Amino acid sequence: MAPSSSIQFIDTALSCTSTPYALSYPDPKQKWIIRKHLLSLIIDYPTFKPSTDTFFHNDGTAVYLLNAAGNLHLAGSKYTPPVPLTIWVHENYPYMPPIVVVSPNDSMSPIHQNHPFVDPYSGATSSPYLQTWIFPRCNLTELVRNLVKIFSHDHPFLTPSPSSSLTHPSLVSKMEALDRLSGTIHYDKIALKAKNEEEMEGLSSLQVELMKRNHVARNMIISLEKERGSLKERATELMEQADVVMNWLRVNDVTIEGDGMEDAFEGDDEESRSVIDCLAAERAIEDVIYALDKAVEEGAVPCFDAYLRQVRLLAREQFYHRARLVKLRGPDILLWPD
């Protein structure tokens, strides 16, 4: 039997009609059902005590409701902590389910983040029993019995172990099977979400790497296009210079057979021969420096210091030949002869 103090409190609260202590239950038949269900709950679970207070819905609506608060003791180890619950009787009860809140005090552990039925921040509790609430099949006592099974299987303050769900389906009720299925799906969703986030992070890193490679490839293509253009210009210059030579040979009626190219250009005097020799040496050094540059670009030169020393020597010798050409024929001699 329920304590007389609890019976008296419920009767007084339900019969009060004066503001602001009048409860938000206008229908006398509704009040009778609420009284019956609350007393049944307190008889089966004596740790729960009735109370009244203002409840604020999510939309800001304030109502004055009955509630039952107490510690829900679970079967298991003596170290299993009880679950402090507050059950608010909705103003449209029994056709609307009650509002259940897990309300730990400061000395308790926080609600673990991934609980399938309890919000870790507000403590609001939602289970298949509440989600499928239908009167008269559902009531406060059966709700608490259902919560005992849920919290014994998945405690709000303890991280569940992988072996806690290894109960044969034939040994549990339909509602308990639905509860466990909901919990399993919830944890599977969390695991899948974590896996997807990890994959997304990996794909994001891969995207960044591919963007870097794309940037490098584009720079290489631009560099190759520039080099292609430079080589094309160089080939055009060489063809023009070859045309100039061939025209000069035709004008001067010079015939080249076999290895007679060197014999086609002979100086009439010592100064002309010196000019030809200096010009040939200067052009040869220019070709050697160009070849060295290409070798460095291709990584064929193992020692960069040796490359610099060689280029300095060649540049010094080239400068000597150019200075001599300027002295012999003037600065225009450095241009390809027309």
Image: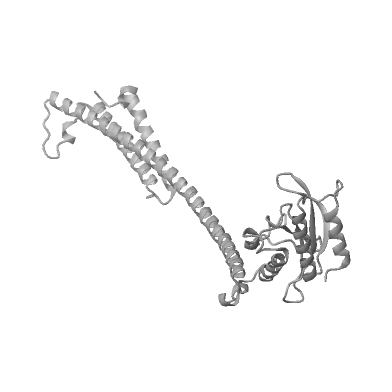
- Place of residue 326 in the rendered image (x, y in percent of width and height, measured from the top left): 34, 25
Is residue 330 visible in this depiction of the protein? no
Task: Say whether residue 50 is left or right of residue 120.
Answer: right
Is residue 193 visible in this depiction of the protein? yes
> On screen, 19 above or below 3?
above
The quarter of the image holding the C terminus is top left
The front one of 98 and 212 is 98
The quarter of the image holding the N terminus is bottom right
Residue located 47% across and 49% down the image = 207
- Place of residue 182 in the rendered image (x, y in percent of width and height, measured from the top left): 59, 64
Task: Say whether residue 272 is left or right of residue 69.
Answer: left
Is the image coloured rainbow, by chain, by secondary structure, or in one colour? Answer: one colour
The front one of 330 and 103 is 103
The front one of 49 and 111 is 49
Disc tally is: 0
> On screen, 26 above or below 5?
above
Task: Say whether residue 309 is left or right of residue 325.
Answer: right
Give the farthest residue toward the front.
Answer: 29
The front one of 150 and 92 is 92
- Place of residue 101 in the rendered image (x, y in percent of width and height, measured from the top left): 74, 58
Hey, which quadrant is residue 71 in on the image? Answer: bottom right
- Place of residue 140 in the rendered image (x, y in percent of width and height, measured from the top left): 72, 63
